[in-house]
Image (cartoon, rainbow, N blue to C red):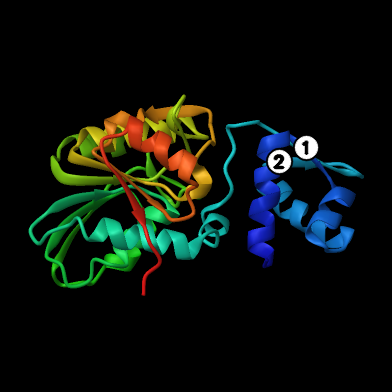
Amino acid sequence: MNAAERRMEIFRLLQENQSVEVIELAARFDVTPMTIRRDLAVFEKQGLITTNYGGAYLNKGTSIEPSFSMKSTQCIDKKQMIGYEAARMIRDGDVIIIDCGTTTLQLAKYLKGKKLTVITNSWPVVSFLGGLPKIKLLLAPGEYDDISAGTFGISTAKFIENFHADKVFIGTHGCSLEQGASVPEIYDAEMKRALLAAGKEKVLMVDHTKFGVKCLAKHADLSDFDCIITDDGIDPETQEVIRANCQKLIVAQEMK
């Protein structure tokens, strides 16, 4: 387990338990207490936690989210599998919307060579697709948010309302049968609802670690999506429950 993976696991434990102890984490990950304190300092610098001598506790419960750069290192192989499956749904001539997020960004990496119109509020998506001759790229205006690496706000939502896309691809931070798809920030949930309303076919891209996670702000029921794409890390019991409560579930397999 590398440092980024360890920190994401520590963050998961913080969300689950609201607090952590340095000594316990050091034993769990077989590293020194000093290493754990450096990990916690990264979260404290982002304003996610408050540290004390023996450990740390969350500042705002479910309304917190790690940075885009930190999330982008988690489950990258699984996210690539999901991105590949999502790209297979897209045909030349489609107008598509791509949401902010590290999983939806992987979709952009498989669009080279396709003739498309892409609407997005994600700067990383724009950076990746910019310059591809067959892709017409429309970036939504608004206030930039560093955590999501995208634009948000009233002007963003009004811009999206002017379009009707063939397909919209949405990411999420939490996914459960009880709460549906949810995220830590209210403004992000509002943006995702606007994106969903602008798409004919609605696709949720969610890696297996998000199942069972419940965040502050719900943005959709699972039944609102025409398709949910996840990876082969999803356990059989969860897969069975999701299939029974959504229109279509695709489990992406390891790419050969």
Q: Residue furthest right?
A: 53
Which part of the image, by quadrant, shows the N terminus? Answer: bottom right
Badge 2 element: helix
Q: Are marks 1 and 2 in contact (CB under 8 Å)?
A: yes
Residue 128 visible, this orientation: yes
Instruction: Tell me residue 197's x, y (percent).
Output: 22, 32
Q: Residue furthest bottom?
A: 256
Q: Residues within 10 Å of mark 1 (few under 14, many from 20)?
A: some
Instruction: Tell me residue 243's x, y (percent).
Output: 34, 37
Observer-nearest of 45 and 11: 11
Which part of the image, by quadrant, shows the C terminus? Answer: bottom left
Q: Residue at x 53, y 31 (%)?
A: 214
In the rendered image, the vertical position of residue 217 relative to residue 139, given as above or below: above
Q: Residues within 10 Å of mark 2 (few under 14, many from 20)?
A: some
Residue identifier under label 2: 14
Query: Which circle marks residue 251 in the picture?
Result: none
In the rendered image, the vertical position of residue 16 relative to residue 100, given as above or below: above
Residue 126 visible, this orientation: no
Q: Quadrant of residue 64?
A: top right
The three-letter code of the residue at mark 1 reads Ser
Question: Would residue 151 appear left or right of 32 to someone viewing this image?
Answer: left
Observer-nearest of 35 and 236: 236
Q: Which comes before the other along the chain, label 1 or label 2? A: 2
The three-letter code of the residue at mark 2 reads Leu
